[in-house]
Amino acid sequence: MAHPDCESMLNDIQSIQEKPETLMKLYFHKFKKNKLAVFGAIVLLIIIFLTILAPWISPYHPAETDVANKLAAPSAAHWLGTDRLGRDILARLLYGGRISLLIAFSSVAGTLVIGTTIGALAGYYGGFLDAVLMRLVDIVLSIPSIFLLITIVTIFEPGMNKLIFILALISWTSTARIVRGEFLALRTKEFVLASRTIGTRSYKIIFSHMLPNAMSPIIVTATLLIGTVILTEAALSYFGLGVQPPTPSWGNMLQDAQNVTVLMKAPWYPAFPGFMIFITVLCFNFVGDGLRDALDPKER
């Protein structure tokens, strides 16, 4: 017969092992209750799926021209019509979605790395390091982001890779503040104090113990930030400072459509990239709101 203390310890270990699965089920169950969030997630999966399969869905290459059918109306040959150079709009919409989403996901990933690292260091160590890092955040926030973006892009010349780097470089401040707040609350918890007492290295406490407990707000922030980055990329590409033709993106498709001839002969053209930007950003916001409600510890 097992000793009662050993039996209790085994039960505790078993409950700890089952906790992540139980929490995931709880989060998923709460997320499903938000109909708009579920709708947004389904639409986003469809959009991502279509952009990934663009070469198999579209019979045309985005740079392929059909000179005889410039600004053609939607037809069996060109489901969404053609642009002013005779390029298939559906092909450019799908391939452009690839570029826009790639920029959004990549720049947000960079933002999370920078913001999480700075916020974690500031919140964990506090004191002088915290003061210096937070003043850096204040300096970046004090500069209007759109002017900073335009200035940097103008200096380094437009391009997709540069745009990803620049967007990540100026978008990390909100993530840093959120992570710092979470770490300030977590560093007084018993498991952190116990880890310090037994001599666990700081980097292991930060990344193995504290960061997993701060992931909920980080995930929500990242989801909402993706929509913002898509809008920013579209705005920069619209003004000729983002993705450069002939590489398609939803932003430079809008720029290409803002032509008197296009608007007179093919007024439907700008509606397609505009709708894709609108529905994608809206769905990311729906998913972000749903995750925020599902991951909120006060609602458990």
Image (tube, helix red, strand yellow):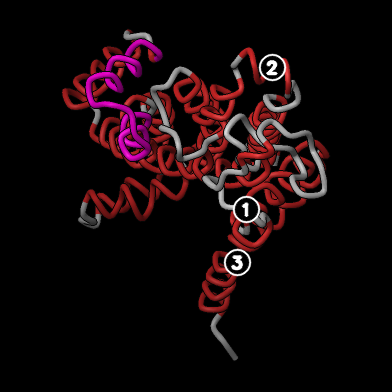
Left or right placement of residue 166 versus residue 260 in this view: left
Question: Spatial distance from mark 1 to mark 2, Cα to Cα?
Answer: 23 Å
Q: Earlier in the sequence, mark 1 or mark 3?
A: 3
Identify residue for label 1: 60
Amino acid type of disc 1?
A: Tyr
Q: Residue sitting at 36 percent across and 55 percent down?
A: 208
From this viewpoint, is residue 157 visible? yes
Q: Position of residue 56 (x, y in %)?
A: 64, 62
Q: Residue sitting at 39 percent across and 26 percent down?
A: 171
Question: Spatial distance from mark 2 to mark 3, Cα to Cα?
Answer: 63 Å
Quarter holding residue 170: top left
Q: Which residues are magenta?
A: 146-167
Q: Position of residue 72 (x, y in %)?
A: 73, 34
Identify residue for label 2: 263
Identify residue for label 3: 15
From this viewpoint, is residue 293 visible? no
Question: Closest to the observer: 57 or 187?
Answer: 57
Left or right placement of residue 275 versus residue 121 in this view: right
Q: Residue sitting at 64 percent across and 17 percent down?
A: 261
Amino acid type of disc 2?
A: Leu
- Quadrant assignment for the N terminus: bottom right
